[in-house]
Image (cartoon, rainbow, N blue to C red):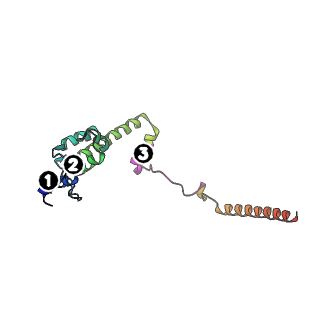
Amino acid sequence: MPKDLARRDAKPGTKRVRDAQAKPDDTRQTRGKRNSKPDITDKRQSKQGGLLFTVEQIRQALIAGRGIYAQAARYLTGPNGAPMSRRYVADYVNRTPELLETVRQIEEARLDLAEAKLMDKLEQGFFPAVRFYLTTKGKDRGYVPRTEATGKDGAPLFDYGALAAGISDEIARLYDRIASTSEAAAIH
């Protein structure tokens, strides 16, 4: 159907009007088929055609949200006044190399902070921190968790022979008790 005809005979707000107004290079759905992913390396466009967010705005939201996409999304408000979704931020970041680098830098800073806190606990003599540090960083000095595969003085962990004998004795006693009970029941 020609665009002019679709615009004239369609009611405002209907699918035919939206289809007729959609451009081939538009990121909206066109006649039921979704176009390829839009290029949002510099900006993302809203349905009205205006800018929604710039890379710098997303970067600032990521910094404020400490690199957590869901928190960064809360700092971004969409055209309808609602916060953006985590998925929106993740898609934007995954398509923008500078934002991927920002997220990497935030994660590195968080790792530095965690290491500093661990060192504080080590200096205080907090035993779980000491043990964690030695088992992760002191392996070359022999601080490796050990798993025992044998019992005391190399004996097996479990004596299966004694277990089998014990079970056999128990089964024999149960059988005798059942047999004597059924014989007694048959006599009465």
In the rendered image, residue 143, in percent from the top left (x then y), is placed at: 44, 48
In the rendered image, residue 112, in percent from the top left (x then y), is placed at: 31, 41
Mark 3 surroundings within 10 Å by alpha-carbon count, few (fewer than 14), some (14 through 19), many (20 or more): some
Residue 8 is inside the magenta segment:
no
**Magenta segment:** 131-151
Whole-number angstrom distance, CA of label 3 to CA of label 1? 77 Å
Residue placed under numbered mark 3 in the picture: 134
Mark 2 surroundings within 10 Å by alpha-carbon count, few (fewer than 14), some (14 through 19), many (20 or more): few
> Is residue 27 in sight in this rendering?
no
Of circles 3 and 2, which is in front?
2
Q: Residue sitting at 67 percent across and 61 percent down?
A: 163
> Is residue 119 in sight in this rendering?
yes
Residue nearer the viewer, 66 or 1: 1
In the rendered image, the quadrant that contains the C terminus is bottom right
In the rendered image, residue 119, in percent from the top left (x then y), is placed at: 37, 38
Residue placed under numbered mark 2 in the picture: 13
